[in-house]
Image: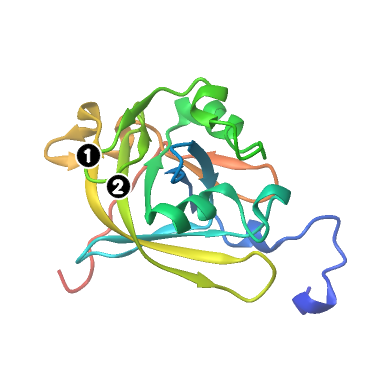
């Protein structure tokens, strides 16, 4: 099969995001200038640089009460900070609950019963039980082609690591069972790792 996206694929569901998978999930916490907390998962998310450490996520839809975007991007425009929480398999139901398109006045931490803690380097909440959380200062928001498509880039200014996820001096993914986004309604949990040594090492 071959198709040109602008001409359609002819399938019952769009295969694009199932092809680009698995994708890590950034559970993005933000706070509005008025102090309203927000929490939402994004699967267009990744780390993009080591020095200084930087991450990005993309928002690809809009809410009626936010004009051209969603609460996360709107809040980041106001405050220029956000926190990326790394979810684990045991938090999957909370992640899913926070994905609902609530009104801008709803606090997803409270709505989904998610325990929060205050960040250290930015004015924002984080998920207290997350295996890791990355406090970020906005570097740029890039408008992408298409309606409501924005890529948000941030420099990591503080990193929280849950103590039980540190083993032998390493952040150990086997300590918390990472989850990833596949396509459609499918997710994956990472239960087996393997190691490869680069040829030039």
Q: Is residue 3 visible?
A: no
**What residue lies at 37% left-to-right and 35% top-to-bottom?**
125
Q: Is residue 147 left or right of residue 56?
A: right
User: SS at mark 2?
Assistant: strand
Residue at horizontal 28 percent and vertical 52 percent from the top = 195
Question: Dot 2 corresponds to which residue?
Answer: 135
Residue 79 is situated, as x and y percent measured from the top left of the image, at 39, 52
Relative horizontal placement of residue 65, taking residue 142 as reference (left or right) = right
Nearest the viewer among 65 and 19 is 65
Position of 200 relative to 153 (above/below): below
Pointer 1 or 2: first along the chain: 1
Q: Compared to 69, does 181 lie above or below?
A: above
Q: Could you say which quadrant of the image residue 173 lies in?
A: top left
Task: Find residue 43 and report its horizontal and vertical position in percent.
Answer: 53, 51
- Residue 18 or residue 138, whichever sits in front: 138
Q: Position of residue 8 (x, y in %)?
A: 83, 72
Q: Residue at x 48, y 47 (%)?
A: 25
- Secondary-structure class at tag 1: loop
Q: Are marks 1 and 2 in contact (CB under 8 Å)?
A: yes
Image height of 128 relative to 156, above or below: above
Which quarter of the figure has residue 198? Answer: bottom left
Query: Which residue, given by chain and number where applicable, does mark 1 sit on?
Result: 120
Does residue 108 lie above or below 115 as drawn? below
- Quadrant position of the N terminus in the picture: bottom right
């Amino acid at each position: 099969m071959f198709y040109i996206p602008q001409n359609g694929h002819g399938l019952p569901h769009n295969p694009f995001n199932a092809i680009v998978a698995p994708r890590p999930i950034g559970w993005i916490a933000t706070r509005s200038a008025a102090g309203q907390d927000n929490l939402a998962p994004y699967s267009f998310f990744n780390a993009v640089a080591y020095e200084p450490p930087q991450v990005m996520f993309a928002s690809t839809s809009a809410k009626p009460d936010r004009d051209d975007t969603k609460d996360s991007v709107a809040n980041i425009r106001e405050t220029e900070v956000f926190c990326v929480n790394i979810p684990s398999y045991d938090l999957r139901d909370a992640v899913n609950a926070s994905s609902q398109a609530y009104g801008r006045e709803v606090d997803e931490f409270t709505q989904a019963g998610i325990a929060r803690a205050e960040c250290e380097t930015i004015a924002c909440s984080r998920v207290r039980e997350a295996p890791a959380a990355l406090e970020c200062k906005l570097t740029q928001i890039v408008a992408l082609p298409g309606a409501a498509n924005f890529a948000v880039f941030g420099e990591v200014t503080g990193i929280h690591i849950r103590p039980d996820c540190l083993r032998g001096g390493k952040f150990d993914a086997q300590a918390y069972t990472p989850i990833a986004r596949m396509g459609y309604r499918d997710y994956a949990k990472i239960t087996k790792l393997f190691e490869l040594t680069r040829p030039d090492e």
